[in-house]
């Protein structure tokens, strides 16, 4: 399916005019108030690889009490009531800690998140291994209430805390050859019991086009509900791409690679028929084992009413232009 023509769009997929106008008004107000603007990269310190810095004690990147203060308001938050903290932190996919939805909450206490480093490599001028505290420094943290979608036909609404991924990637000065960005999760069988089993090909990896990675909605996330990410939710650094399925939200990132060709992704490697590279939420593209046309909001019960799934998870106005002339049925 190509990007839809007006006559092909179902009524259930159309954003109500009142919602559209309200969003536009919020954005205009926010721009006028200076709440959203292009990142001032000149005000940020240059990122220096650890091997070029003086050795010494590494500072904690987050407050000791775990609370994230002075968060920047996000004017485009969804209006839906957030899913409960208990559901968001107790029902997770994180195979490094087990394949059951409740395994991560039970097992992820073994993960050590300080000190933490991220290695940057590939098609960029500035590469190396960087301390997490240096990566976060210079970025204003925002709380964004996003719809979050899982492929198994359920969804949640989460107040994530982070900053636009693109603001960080620009600091590494990607070259013109950087067409894609690949991400890797920590691969440590001592800390992650699930890695001892060949459920997937470790380390876990994901990828985006450079345009998707640079899109202002793509969030590099360090917290939720105003506090530091719990281990089971991907501490200390994870990705959130709100118009894609949840397996695009790679957790516990330790490596970022700029590439000139489409990178491998874990679920595509495991089963390309079911999990494509793009992973865009599309109600018209059924998963081979279930329909994507409707979803159930996490926190209800098996008798809760299902609701129509929205194209691009409701973010079509912002992101559809990324996929002009791309067949969404074959590039899923």
Image (cartoon, rainbow, N blue to C red):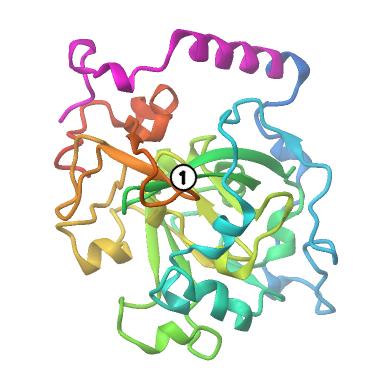
Q: Locate residue 68 relative to residue 11 in the image: left or right.
A: right
Specify the segment rendered in magenta. Answer: 1-30
User: Can residue 102 be found in the magenta stretch?
Assistant: no
In percent of width and height, residue 123 lies at 44, 55
Q: Quadrant of the N terminus?
A: top left
Magenta stretch prevailing secondary structure: helix
Q: Quadrant of residue 26?
A: top right
Mark 1 neighbour density, 10 Å: few (under 14) some (14–19) many (20 or more): many
Q: Locate residue 257 relative to residue 231 in the image: left or right.
A: left
Q: Quadrant of the C terminus?
A: top left
Q: Residue at x 84, y 78 (%)?
A: 57
User: What is the tally of numbered marks visible in this picture?
Assistant: 1
The residue that disc 1 covers is 241
37 shown above or below 168:
above
Q: Residue at x 72, y 46 (%)?
A: 139
In percent of width and height, residue 6 lies at 23, 11
Q: Residue at x 18, y 17 (%)?
A: 8
Which is nearer the eye, 158 or 73?
A: 158
Q: Locate residue 201 relative to residue 62 in the image: left or right.
A: left
328 shown above or below 184:
above
């Amino acid at each position: 399916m190509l990007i839809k023509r007006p006559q092909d769009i179902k009524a259930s997929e159309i954003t109500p005019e009142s919602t559209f106008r309200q969003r536009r008004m919020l954005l205009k107000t926010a721009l006028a108030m200076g709440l959203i603007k292009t990142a001032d990269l000149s005000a940020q310190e240059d990122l220096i690889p650890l091997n070029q810095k003086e050795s010494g004690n590494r500072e904690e990147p987050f407050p000791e009490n775990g609370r994230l203060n002075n968060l920047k308001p996000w004017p485009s938050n969804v209006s839906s009531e957030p899913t409960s903290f208990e559901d968001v932190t107790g029902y997770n996919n994180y195979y490094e800690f087990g394949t059951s939805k409740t395994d991560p909450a039970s097992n992820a206490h073994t993960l050590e998140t300080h000190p933490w480093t991220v290695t940057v490599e590939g098609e960029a001028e500035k590469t190396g291994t960087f301390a997490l505290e240096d990566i976060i420094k210079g970025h204003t943290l925002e709380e964004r209430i996003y719809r979050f979608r899982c492929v198994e036909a359920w969804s949640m609404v989460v107040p994530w805390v982070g900053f636009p991924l693109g603001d960080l990637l620009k600091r590494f000065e990607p070259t013109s050859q950087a067409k894609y960005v690949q991400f890797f999760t920590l691969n440590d069988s001592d800390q992650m019991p699930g890695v001892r089993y060949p459920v997937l090909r470790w380390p876990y990896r994901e990828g985006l086009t450079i345009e998707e990675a640079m899109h202002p909605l793509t969030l590099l996330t360090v917290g939720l509900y105003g506090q530091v990410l719990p281990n089971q939710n991907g501490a200390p650094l994870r990705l959130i791409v709100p118009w894609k399925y949840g397996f695009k939200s790679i957790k516990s990132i330790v490596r970022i690679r700029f590439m000139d060709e489409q990178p491998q992704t874990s679920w595509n490697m495991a089963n390309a028929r079911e999990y494509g590279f793009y992973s865009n939420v599309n109600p018209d593209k059924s998963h081979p084992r279930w329909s994507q046309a409707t979803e159930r909001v996490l926190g209800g019960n098996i008798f809760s009413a299902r609701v129509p799934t929205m194209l691009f998870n409701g973010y079509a106005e912002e992101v559809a232009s990324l996929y002009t002339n791309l067949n969404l049925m074959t590039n899923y």
